[in-house]
Amino acid sequence: MGCLKTMNMRTISGLVLLLLGACLFLTQGKTFGPGQIFAYFWPAIFVIPLGLFFHWLYFTMIGRKGIGLLIPGGILFTAGVVCQISMLFNSWGYMWPGFILAVAVGLFEFYWFGNRNKWMLIPINILTVLSLLFFAVFSIGSIYNHFILSQPIFAIVFILAGAFILLVKKKDI
């Protein structure tokens, strides 16, 4: 009986923390509706699927003749991920080097699935290093201020704590 009571308490507290964290993360103190969904998730609705569409065209329909489709596909997909992260965390000032990385990803896909011209690695490496350098220089001081001290970190902590309580058996603790 005591084990069942503990299990029910753990389940309820885990679910409450999980839902509280998700609510805090999505609303961040504001009301949440269809307009906010469109405003926050436009990259996942438009840009990322377009990048995936170019990949789908290459891998299923056109094949080796359409190798050039991978360049815009890689650029759009990576730029969409960068935009989505920037929208969710309001971090445009820190995520902009991802657009440089997007070009490197598109070119790298062209290199990897194409004829592997070694000269393609020069712009790919330059763009990748430049992007990572800008990420490092502009992000080091802001990581603590933006992510650690803001409300979304509490939401993520609540979500992880709730999931931990739900998934870990009492014997494992």
Image (cartoon, rainbow, N blue to C red):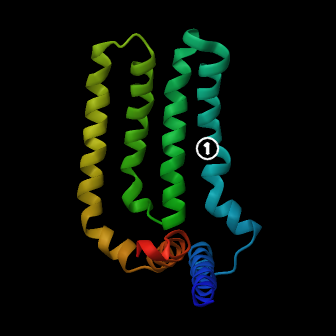
Q: Is residue 95 depicted above or below 158 in this figure?
A: above
Q: Nearer the viewer, residue 157 or 104?
A: 157
The picture quadrant where one finds residue 77 is top right
Q: Is residue 6 depicted above or below 28 in this figure?
A: below
Q: Residue at x 25, y 69 (%)?
A: 141
Query: Is 15 left, or right, of 99 in this rendering?
Result: right
Q: Nearer the viewer, residue 148 or 131?
A: 148
The picture quadrant where one finds residue 10 is bottom right
Q: Which residue is situated farthest in the front direction here?
A: 1
Residue 35 percent coordinates (x, y): 73, 67
Q: Which residue is situated farthest in the right direction here?
A: 34
Q: Residue at x 66, y 45 (%)?
A: 46
Q: Is residue 119 depicted above or below 96 in this figure?
A: above
Q: Residue at x 36, y 76 (%)?
A: 148
Residue 91 percent coordinates (x, y): 44, 64
Residue 147 percent coordinates (x, y): 39, 72
Residue 103 percent coordinates (x, y): 42, 34
Question: In the rendered structure, which amino acid carries the disc numbered 1?
Answer: Val
| Residue assigned mark 1 | 47
Query: Is 81 left, or right, of 126 in this rendering?
Result: right
The picture quadrant where one finds residue 49 is top right
Q: Quadrant of the C terminus?
A: bottom left
Q: Say few, some or many: other residues with alpha carbon within 10 Å of mark 1 (under 14 / 14 to 19 / 20 or more).
A: many
Q: Quadrant of the N terminus?
A: bottom right
Which element carries disc 1, helix, strand or loop? helix
Query: Is 139 left, or right, of 108 in this rendering?
Result: left
